[in-house]
Image (cartoon, grey):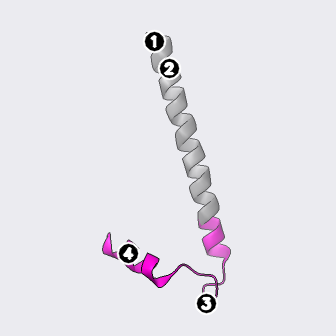
Amino acid sequence: MLIILLSASLLVWIAVLIDASMGLKSLDRLEDSNTMTEGPLLSVITAARAGE
């Protein structure tokens, strides 16, 4: 039983690390982009602010 719980928690941690690395890559891509020509669409920004 303990091995099953440890395996499940290990899988959860792996999923969290993969998700965090993907999120940081997309964040770096947004920070490096030229906001005047390559920035996110206004509708995306508006939807994000409406969710706050």
Q: Which tag is nearer the camera, tag 4 or tag 2? A: 4
Which label's residue is closer to the chain start, 1 or 4?
1
Residue 46: image location, x then y, percent? 39, 80
Please state if 51 lies on the left or on the right of 32 as rendered.
left
Say which residue appears at 61% left-offset and 90% top-offset.
36
Say which residue appears at 61% left-offset and 51% top-offset.
21
Residue 7's place in the image compared with 52, above or below, is above
Asked whether disc 2 touches disc 1, contact meaning CB atoms under 8 Å apart, the reply is yes
Disc 4 to disc 3, C-alpha distance: 19 Å
Q: Secondary structure at mark 3?
A: loop
Residue occupied by mark 1: 2
Q: Secondary structure at mark 1?
A: helix
Please state if 13 lies on the left or on the right of 48 as rendered.
right
Asked whether disc 1 touches disc 3, contact meaning CB atoms under 8 Å apart, the reply is no
Q: Which mark is residue 6?
A: 2
| Residue type pointed to by label 2 | Leu
Say which residue appears at 61% left-offset and 63% top-offset.
26
